[in-house]
Image (cartoon, grey):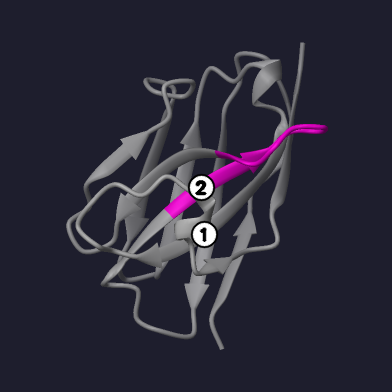
Amino acid sequence: QVQLVESGGGLVQAGGSLRLSCAASGRTFRNYAMGWFRQAPGKEREFVATIRWGTGSTYYADSVKGRFTISRDNAKNTVYLQMNSLKPEDTAVYYCAAGRDLGVVRTSEYDMDYWGKGTLVTVSS
């Protein structure tokens, strides 16, 4: 049974940092792309960042480029999202997701096959 379990969310002041973790289990993810999405209150879920597990190549939404970094640890089967210079508009539930790596950047939630339950990030002004 595939499981993606997020952790690391919490309350932080604007300008601060948090690191989210996504522990993946239940299958081999070498041929998958891992993604982080977020959903703010009253808004649709949106793409944040993705990493191809096999190559390590990454892609970011413009809104987080230069502030967030996605990475993976093969030994721990874990994906991370380091978030720096946080802004109140980053407040959202952050979800980890996995979708088959088809060799192109995938940023749509409909491309994802597996989802975690999410972790809440609140950034105070």
- Residue drawn at (28%, 63%) of the image: 101
Which residue position is annotated with label 1? 97
Residue 86 image position (x, y, % from top left): 59, 20
Q: Left of 49 or right of it: where is 14?
A: right
Quadrant in the picture for residue 30: bottom left
Q: Amino acid at mark 2?
A: Trp
State yes or no: discs 2 and 1 in contact (Cβ < 8 Å). Answer: yes
Seen in the picture, residue 86 relative to 102 is either above or below; the reply is: above
Quadrant in the picture for residue 39: top right
- Residue drawn at (50%, 24%) of the image: 84
- Residue drawn at (81%, 33%) of the image: 41
Residue 124 image position (x, y, % from top left): 78, 18
Query: Residue 2: which disc?
Result: none
Seen in the picture, residue 5 relative to 26 is either above or below; the reply is: above
Q: Amino acid at mark 1?
A: Ala
Residue 85 image position (x, y, % from top left): 53, 17
Magenta residue span? 35-46
CA neighbours of label 2 inside 10 A, class few (<14), some (14 to 19), many (20+):
many
Which residue position is annotated with label 2? 36
Provide the secondary structure element on which disc 2 rests: strand
